[in-house]
Image (cartoon, rainbow, N blue to C red):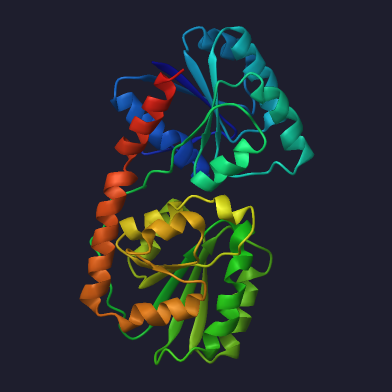
Amino acid sequence: MNILWLIRHNLETTSGKYTSKTASVRYRCLIPAFQLLKQGHQVRIFTVEGCDVDDFIKTINRIDVIIVSKVDYVKAENLISIAKQSGKKIVIDFCDVHFDRKEVIEPLNRIIKNTDLIVASTPKLKEVISQYFSAPIVEISDPYEGTRKPPKFFPNGTLRLLWFGHIINIETINPLVLNLPNADFQQTVELEIISSELDNIRESCTSYNSSHDGEVKLKFTPWSVNAVWHAFSSTDIVVIPSIDNSKNNVKSPNRLVESIWAGKMVVAHPLPTYLKFQDYAIIERDIIEGIFRCLSYSENENTDRISAGQAYIKKHHSPKVIAKQWEAALKTL
């Protein structure tokens, strides 16, 4: 099968391989595309930004199906129309919802008329999409990323916590940051925050630290894939607080999957896709209470939980498994 992925942003090259700072590009395009190549399919990737229309037209002559993944729909609409007029199958992939935005829903309503299949990253997202569009929908989750690390849980001296994520979600850690000084963990606590730069975030961390005499410390690290994996090596517990709303409730479990795959214990808010991991992580609305629960278990109990989680992830979220799901979906067209 000849497949073309249409994405929003330009890609980067690291050690001769394509990558992206955008998680959705890696999980929803690059990782499955690479696996589909290994399975014998032909895959091309085009970016909407700066796309040469003539080059696009020449390329799609050799293409069977086009997967549209989180693009600027206004800019992509003409390309999708051209592809459909050329007899190509069109797949629209969703990993979040912004249907309340006029600049999204208006071009989408027109694009969906040319769409043969919709892919949703979670069951809840599939449910939401079905309320807007009538095209067939299948669910395909995110794969894990990186190399599996041996389970490790042995807090020693300082309890090291890690939160990583997009800067738009940083408000979710506010209750944790405010309440950490009141939690009696019987040891010093450090919360590392890995995200994009935000105005005054470093100054805010410095001010917070000086107010708590070293008993509780915030550490900010600019986001990169390598920064996250480096932080995993020294972290005791990954924390994933959240807020119940329509935006968050459709999220995939990719941060939870990535953390367990890296050998870490996780305390996470009970988002719908996190619930199936409750045997492998601490799923708790009160993150501090979840941390106490985690600390109440023995080292072996925690590492056994992580090991079981990694086995589950290998079975359900490996790049090969996810690519097979993509392959099966595309073969229905």
Snapshot quadrant of residue 154: bottom left
Q: Is residue 75 left or right of residue 95?
A: right
98 shown above or below 162: above
Q: Is residue 296 left or right of residue 90?
A: left
Residue 297 vertical placement versus 284 (above, below)? below
Q: What residue appears at the point 36 percent right and 39 percent down from the top-left corner?
A: 15
Looking at the picture, tell me which residue is in the foreground, 151 or 310: 310
Q: Position of residue 146 (x, y in %)?
A: 33, 48
Residue 25 spot, x, y in % from top left: 50, 39
Viewer-side residue, 227 vs 300: 300
Is residue 5 among what the camera can see? yes
Residue 207, percent across and down? 63, 82
- Residue 134 found in image quarter: top right
Which quadrant of the figure has residue 39?
top left
Q: Nearer the viewer, residue 315 or 193?
A: 315
- Judge by depth and name the residue closer to the eye, 86 or 190: 86
Q: Is residue 95 visible?
A: no
> Where residue 248 appears, x then y in whole percent?
59, 55
| Residue farthest to the right, as pictured | 102
